[in-house]
Image: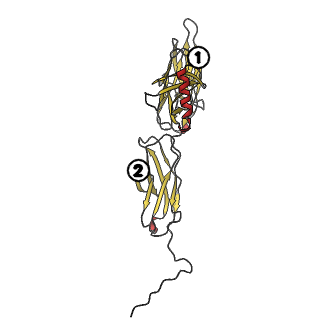
Amino acid sequence: MSALALVLLVLIFENSGAQDKLVVSFTPNWASIIRGESINMTCNGADSTQFYVWYKDQKLVKVGLGVNQYSIDFAYTWHSGDYLCETVNATSDPVRLDVRNVNLLLQVPHSVYEGDSVSLRCHSYPGYSAGGTIFYNKDNEIIQSTGEETLSLEKISMGAAGHYSCKKTIFYGNQNDHQHIAEGTLAVKELFSSPHLDVNPQEVTNGANMTLTCNRMSKSAPDLLFAFYRGKKTVKEFSPSNKYQVWSTKPNHSGNYTCEVRTSNYNVKKRSPVLHIQIQAHYPLSGEKKKFKPNKI
């Protein structure tokens, strides 16, 4: 290891207490490739003036100023592994690359979130001619038999995750043709969890102010919009605020409330369970007496 790399590793270690996240992306965006193909990795999330360190399976493979990319021009099976990048004050999660020595490969993308539109590719070894392609879902049902090597899935839900397979005929020069089957798993990450409603105060009395909060766990969707409903009536249209406030509540504010969260592009939408709110009448506390003031003479 060079002296520069050692100095950089020391700096990273000293700053490891307050690290942010970087993200490694692949071009092309496939989790697996066939032996002999090329792939480029990019470390996203830091400016180009920083030092970058690249690791494969926790072993240093590259280091340099502004080197936010790592390329493999001719992949061998031993290039398979977990890759991550680091800067002085940030680090990425490891991302898996698989290099397969096969004639047919079902390629799926990395980092797929619900609401994304993605493609699956039934890819044959470069240089071989191939016939039509058939795609199957996890129940072994045909979902596409047009002969195209790519299957497009639009605005996918969490239910799209699972096992897929494809079949293709490959021709080997003057030899007989053979049918090959490739299998792969599509992992879909949740963009944000289903919301739930909270009310403050928990017991709302007539005339008091009430605040409803639509809470959700956001994973990778910073720009969300919120709407609120009482029964079938919309009481607040979609907006960036996750709060709905009612001043000086009345009995007719009682009802079944829900909130809805959606992305700005409408691709993902989720609604909370019903929260019943009953506006309580205000009664004097037990033993409370009305103060009497005598008239002045």
State whether residue 20 is above or below residue 280: above
Residue 179's mark? 1
Instruction: Please tell me in which quadrant of the rendered image residue 186 appears.
Output: top right
- Residue at position x 54%, y 77% in the image: 285
Quadrant (top left, top right, bottom left, bottom right) of the C terminus: bottom left
- Which element type, helix, strand or loop, lies under badge 2? strand
Q: Nearer the viewer, residue 78 or 65?
A: 65
The CA distance from mark 1 to mark 2 is: 52 Å
The residue to which callout 2 is attached is 238
Answer few, some or many: residues within 10 Å of disc 1's Cα (few below 14, many 20 plus, some between 14 and 19).
Answer: few
- Which element type, helix, strand or loop, lies under badge 1? strand
Residue 26's mark? none
Is 110 positioned to the left or the right of 47 in the image?
right
User: Disc 1 residue type?
Assistant: Gln
**Of callouts 1 and 2, the N-terminal one:** 1
**Residue 209 drawn at (x, y percent):** 45, 65
**Residue 199 drawn at (x, y percent):** 51, 59
User: Disc 2 residue type?
Assistant: Phe
